């Protein structure tokens, strides 16, 4: 058995972007590098947790000492998270596409003189909400993130209630903050009983602090 305050605890961490195909060569995605999620997985493993790391196509390599599950789409991420259950905690740091292209073209879409393509979208499953609202076998602690560009705290507070998770880590992803892809983050921990504002710090320090909080919560 491993050592550390999270020894014997199984934790799922999602990280990175998802990619939603348009046709065999094109996709829709976002700017997540995977840095924040990777740092969280590293911190939890460092405290002795058994970590299942479900990651989209990220810029940053997964940390050592975790079980890595690589996925591409939101639907695949949901399937991988469900397959990794049961778990004591689940941390959702991935930037999941809210929509996918409704009808993925089977072959490369051709450029046609005088005509522009139109894409129709379908809603992706909400992984955080699905796991938060499980009637049976829900992880004891479910932590979501909120990536916001406006009214960060109000939106994150509403998001926590709507999705049904225990904590939301809110971060501002407006252009110029460097939250997407950078090495630092300014986060607010939103719980049912209030909000904690953390100063700007490196993503690994955010992760280390969060992992200690998670260890306390799983023992309290
Ligand atoms: O990867 P980096 O470059 O280090 O950047 C880090 C980050 C900005 C991606 C990260 O800190 C972050 O904020 N991750 C969440 C991004 C996001 O998709 O936020 P959201 O507010 O759209 O979603 C809210 C929560 O629901 C998130 O926990 C998300 O993982 C989850 N979600 C969203 C949609 C969906 N279909 N399924 C989900 O589980």
Image (cartoon, grey):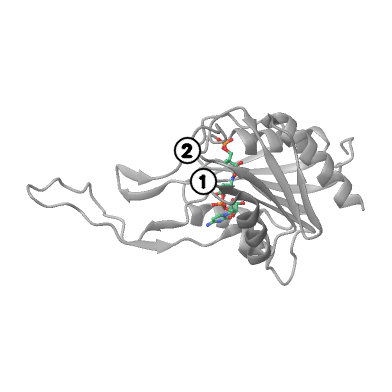
The mark tally for this picture is 2
* Residue found at x 55% / y 31%: 178
- Label 2 sits on residue: 31
CA separation, marks 1 and 2?
16 Å
Element on which disc 1 rests: loop
- Of the two numbered discs 1 and 2 on the same chain, state the one appearing first in sequence: 2
Q: Is residue 104 above or below residue 19?
A: below
Residue 101, quarter of the rendered image: bottom left
* Residue found at x 64% / y 63%: 163
Q: Nearer the viewer, residue 208 or 24?
A: 208
Residue projecting furthest to the left: 113
* Residue found at x 85% / y 42%: 6
* Residue found at x 30% / y 46%: 24
Q: Is residue 14 visible?
A: no
Q: Nearer the viewer, residue 54 or 173?
A: 173
Residue count near mark 1 (Cα–Cα under 10 Å), binned few <14, some 14–19, many ≥20 = many
Residue 29, quarter of the rendered image: top left
Q: Is residue 116 above or below residue 5?
A: below
Q: Is residue 77 visible?
A: yes
Residue projecting furthest to the front: 151
Residue count near mark 2 (Cα–Cα under 10 Å), binned few <14, some 14–19, many ≥20 = some
Q: Is residue 99 above or below residue 18?
A: below
User: Residue 169: x, y in percent?
Assistant: 69, 47
Pointers 1 and 2 in contact (C-beta within 8 Å): no
User: Residue 215: x, y in percent?
Assistant: 85, 44
Establish whether ligand 1 lies closer than 8 Å to the Cβ of label 2: yes
Element on which disc 2 rests: loop
Left/right of residue 76 with respect to residue 203 in the rendered view: left
- On the rendered image, what quadrant is the N terminus found in? top right
- Label 1 sits on residue: 71
Q: Nearer the viewer, residue 31 or 62?
A: 31
């Amino acid at each position: 058995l491993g050592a550390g305050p999270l020894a014997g605890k199984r934790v799922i961490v999602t990280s990175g972007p998802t990619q939603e195909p348009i046709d065999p060569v094109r996709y829709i995605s976002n700017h997540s590098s995977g840095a924040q999620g990777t740092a969280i997985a590293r911190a939890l493993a460092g405290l002795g947790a058994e970590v299942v790391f479900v990651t989209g196509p990220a810029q940053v390599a997964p940390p050592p000492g975790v079980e890595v599950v690589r996925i591409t789409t939101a639907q695949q991420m949901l399937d991988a998270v469900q397959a990794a259950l049961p778990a004591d905690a689940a941390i959702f740091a991935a930037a999941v596409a809210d929509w996918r292209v409704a009808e993925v073209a089977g072959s490369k879409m051709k450029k046609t003189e005088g005509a522009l393509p139109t894409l129709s979208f379908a809603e992706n499953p909400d992984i955080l909400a699905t796991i938060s609202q499980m009637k049976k076998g829900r992880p004891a602690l479910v932590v979501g993130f909120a990536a916001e560009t406006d009214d960060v705290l109000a939106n994150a507070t509403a998001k926590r209630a709507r999705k049904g998770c225990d904590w939301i880590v809110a971060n501002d992803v407006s252009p110029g903050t460097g939250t997407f892809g950078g090495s630092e983050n300014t986060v607010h921990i939103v719980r049912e009983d209030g909000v904690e504002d953390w100063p700007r710090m490196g993503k690994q320090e955010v992760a280390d602090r969060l992992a200690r909080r998670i260890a306390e919560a799983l023992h309290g």
